Image: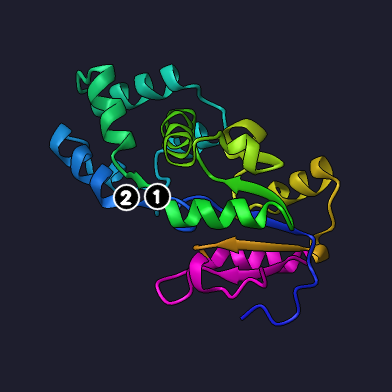
């Protein structure tokens, strides 16, 4: 698939590309906790704006928990809430980490992820436990939506990466499992590949 590898950098999405996720697992926990219908549409509907605000850093974790409690009128413990929110994070397969380590010796690796503070704590530990080293040692820089304030597919998310990392879009391969993010990145000049069931990280055909 990668015919002419004329890129210097690879910009990765996380969930669905490196990290196996199961959003239904979180929605199941939400249902069991008694969440109302509008909060069961995550991530496809941001009706209440709470998820978006949390994933763009406009709410910190405590404010997010409290906003959910106020919206649902449910008395949810911190532990129960965190476990429900993190249930979607499944695993980071060892073979993907091995590939990342090899790629990091040839390309500059970056990550741009729509994520939240609670999720970061979990998946960074997953990576460390599996890889034996921190994500920051494999990637040149990690860009999390709740830290940079921008959420894909907003073009400003990629523009922030370009500016901060000092890279060129046309010299960068972007990998994401969301077609809307792929199209948005291509409009900015990125080389991009849509990751899905038939096209995954392990069969892209990197020239190693």
Give the residue drawn at x 48%, y 69%. 200
Q: Where on the picture, by quarter, is residue 26?
A: top left
Compared across the picture, whether 171 is left or right of 63 comes to right
Q: Quadrant of the N terminus?
A: bottom right
Left or right: residue 31 versus residue 52 is left
**Residue shown at the point (20%, 18%) measured from the top left:** 75
* Label 1 crowd (10 A; few <14 / some 14-19 / many >=20): few
The stretch in magenta equals 179-208
Q: Secondary structure at mark 2?
A: helix
Looking at the rendered structure, the secondary structure element under dot 1 is loop
Circle 2/circle 1 CB separation < 8 Å: yes
- On whether residue 103 falls in the magenta region, the answer is no
Q: Which mark is residue 200?
A: none
Toward which corner of the image does residue 126 lie, by quadrant?
top left
Residue 35 visible in the current orientation: yes
Q: Which residue is mark 2?
A: 23
- In the picture, measured across the screen, residue 192 lies left or right of residue 27, that is right
Q: Residue at x 44, y 37 (%)?
A: 123
- Across and down, in percent, residue 155 comes to 70, 54
Query: Of the numbered discs in the image, which one, if any, rests on residue 43?
Result: 1
Task: Look at the image and tell me whether residue 181 can be seen.
Answer: no
């Amino acid at each position: 698939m990668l015919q002419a590898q004329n890129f210097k950098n690879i910009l990765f999405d996380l969930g669905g590309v490196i990290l196996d996720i199961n959003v239904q697992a979180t929605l199941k926990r939400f249902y069991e906790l008694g969440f109302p219908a509008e909060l069961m549409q995550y991530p496809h509907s941001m009706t209440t704006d709470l998820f978006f605000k949390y994933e763009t850093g406009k709410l910190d974790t405590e404010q997010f928990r409290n906003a959910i409690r106020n919206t649902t009128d449910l008395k949810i413990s911190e532990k129960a809430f965190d476990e429900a929110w993190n249930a979607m994070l499944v695993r980071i397969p060892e073979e993907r980490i091995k590939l990342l380590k090899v790629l990091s010796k040839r390309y500059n690796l970056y990550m741009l992820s729509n994520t939240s503070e609670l999720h970061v704590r979990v998946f960074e530990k997953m990576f460390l436990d599996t890889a034996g080293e921190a994500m920051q040692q494999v990637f040149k820089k990690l860009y999390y939506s709740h830290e940079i304030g921008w959420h894909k597919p907003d073009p400003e998310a990629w523009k922030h990466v370009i500016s901060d990392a000092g890279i060129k879009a046309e010299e960068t391969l972007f990998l994401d499992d969301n077609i809307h993010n792929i199209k948005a990145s291509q409009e900015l000049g990125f080389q991009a590949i849509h990751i899905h069931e038939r096209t995954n990280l392990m069969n892209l055909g990197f020239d190693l």
